[in-house]
Amino acid sequence: MRRLTAIAFALALGGAAGAAAAQDEEIQTVPVQGVKNPEMKSYRAIWKGLDKFDDEHELAPAVPRLKFRIMANKGKGQCIGVCNTTAVAVAGPGEQFGLRIASNDLSVPVPIGADGYFVVPRNEVLYDGNADLILNQKKGSYKMSVDVRTPGLPDNVRRLGDLRLECKVQVAIVKEEIPFWIVALANSILLSRDWCMASIGKDYANFSFFSPAEVVSAHLVDGERNIKLSTSKHSFNIKLGDKSWPDDALVKLEYAPETMVATAAPGAP
């Protein structure tokens, strides 16, 4: 049973890692060119994520809208900032990024910021046409990640409510993409439809979030209360379901100096 639970959570966690902070809000619009076997996601699945963001917006009330970010998978694609690790994808020399929502009858371009961020618009015609969100890059080179980040926080600080909402949005998307029997199995094992806040046995599940710079340490802080979180080279792990920690609690990351990147939170000046 534990193995099945791990499988279900792996499906949810695959895209739940948090994205790096924004570097530039300049917008570039690039025509989508034909690419064999491009990276794509179901538009209806993305729509479920948009719905979940609206439904649970109170977790991150200062975040004005849901953003996504194109991330380069480790060892593949162009990157900016921390180019020797998994990093954000932007158009580099000789490479152009284009994104569109396309059905059989309609195609709508989606602008990508120079920092890799983009916003997915709602379009009922595309929804009814069972459209896909298509990136003009080879499948597997990049991933499209959810990013929920309260404006104004330093790039090494994450708010717990933001992380909870980011996870819930990503899981809503994943549930729409995987077979129903896997969703039903996970719900029955966890005794909950809310995977992000559920427990496994007597403890809460650890969720992993990506960091753009190498993490030396991570602490969850709320007033005088402070606990150390487990980390790996470019991620930190946190138990989102522990409600004794309020949404305004903060995760404070200490970066290795040689990997730090000057960034600003999305929406910051």
Image (spheres, rainbow, N blue to C red):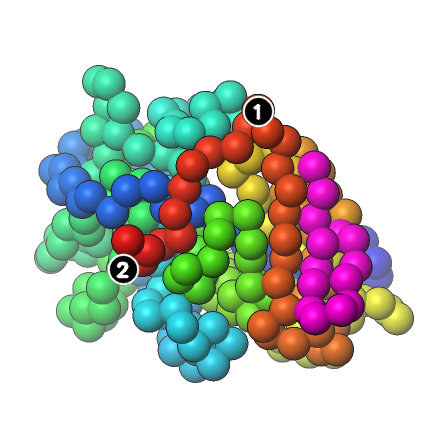
Q: Does the magenta run of residues contain 218? A: yes
| Whole-percent x, y for residue 131 in the image | 25, 58
The one nearer the camera, 194 or 216, is 216
Name the residue located 38 percent from the left edge and 78 percent from the top edge. Answer: 54
Magenta segment boundaries in residue numbering: 216-229
Amino acid at dot 2: Val
Mark 1 is surrounded, within 10 Å at the Cα level, by few (under 14), some (14 to 19) or many (20 or more) other residues, namely: few
Name the outermost residue toward the top: 94
Q: Nearer the viewer, mark 2 or mark 1?
A: 1
**Left or right, 230 with reference to 14:** right
Amino acid of disc 1: Glu
Question: Badge 2 is on which residue?
Answer: 120
The residue that mark 1 highlights is 258
Q: Is residue 255 left or right of residue 149?
A: right
x, y percent for residue 144: 40, 47
Between 202 and 20, the one nearer to me in the picture: 20
269 above or below 62? above
Residue 97 lies within the magenta run: no
Query: In this rendering, does residue 1 appear at all?
Result: yes
Residue 72 rendering spot, x and y as whole percentages: 43, 33
Query: How many marks do you count on the picture?
Result: 2
**The one of 3 and 60 positioned closer to us in this rendering:** 60
Disc 2: CA contacts within 10 A as few (<14), some (14-19) or many (>=20): some
Q: Residue at x 49, y 48 (%)?
A: 155
Mark 2 vs 1, N-terminal side: 2
Q: Is residue 196 left or right of residue 263?
A: right
